[in-house]
């Protein structure tokens, strides 16, 4: 029982990060992406994506290429923002 409680407490911070934050995603996009992708859908290669997994992959590739030092939460937030505002892929 004690082990379960300790495990739950240890996992709580990661559970809080599990939900994407559209406000943070918009901020990250405006700070880092808009310079090259003012219209994400028409940007080179982005109009070839067909689902949120491909979108997340592209966000990750860009973050690594430009050495943005983004963590997984930043990638999820930005992907969520882009999907909600521009792409509207089904989940």
Image (cartoon, rainbow, N blue to C red):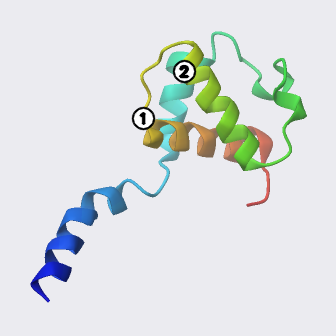
SS assignment at label 1: loop
**Dividing the image into 4 quarters, which one contains the N terminus?**
bottom left
Horizontal relation, residue 90 to residue 85: left or right: right
The quadrant of the image that shows the C terminus is bottom right
Look at mark 2 in the image and give the residue it sits on. Answer: 64
Q: Residues within 10 Å of mark 1 (few under 14, many from 20)?
A: few
Q: Residue at x 54, y 44 (%)?
A: 76
60, above or below 56, in the image:
above
Badge 2 marks a residue whose secondary structure is: helix
Residue visible at 23% across and 73% down in the picture: 8
Q: Is residue 75 above or below residue 9?
A: above
Residue 42, how many percent across, how many down? 86, 23
* Left or right side of 87 for 26: left
Query: In the image as oriented, which residue stretches furthest toward the left?
Result: 2
* Residue 69 position in % (x across, y down): 42, 22
Decide which of 68, 24 is in the foreground and name it. Answer: 68
Write the residue at 42% across / 35% down: 71
Q: Nearer the viewer, residue 56 or 29?
A: 56
Q: Is residue 18 left or right of residue 86?
A: left
Q: Which residue is mark 1?
A: 71
Crowd tier of the residue under label 2, counting other residues whose Cα lies within 10 Å: few below 14, some 14–19, many 20 or above:
few
């Amino acid at each position: 029982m004690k082990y379960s409680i300790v495990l739950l407490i240890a996992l709580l911070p990661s559970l809080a990060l599990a939900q994407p934050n559209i406000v943070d995603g918009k901020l990250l996009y405006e700070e880092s992406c808009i310079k090259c992708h003012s219209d994400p859908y028409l940007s080179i290669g982005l109009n070839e994506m067909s689902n949120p997994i491909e979108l997340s992959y592209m966000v990750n590739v860009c973050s690594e290429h430009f050495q943005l030092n983004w963590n997984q939460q930043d990638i999820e937030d930005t992907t969520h923002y882009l999907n909600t505002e521009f792409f509207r892929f089904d989940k």
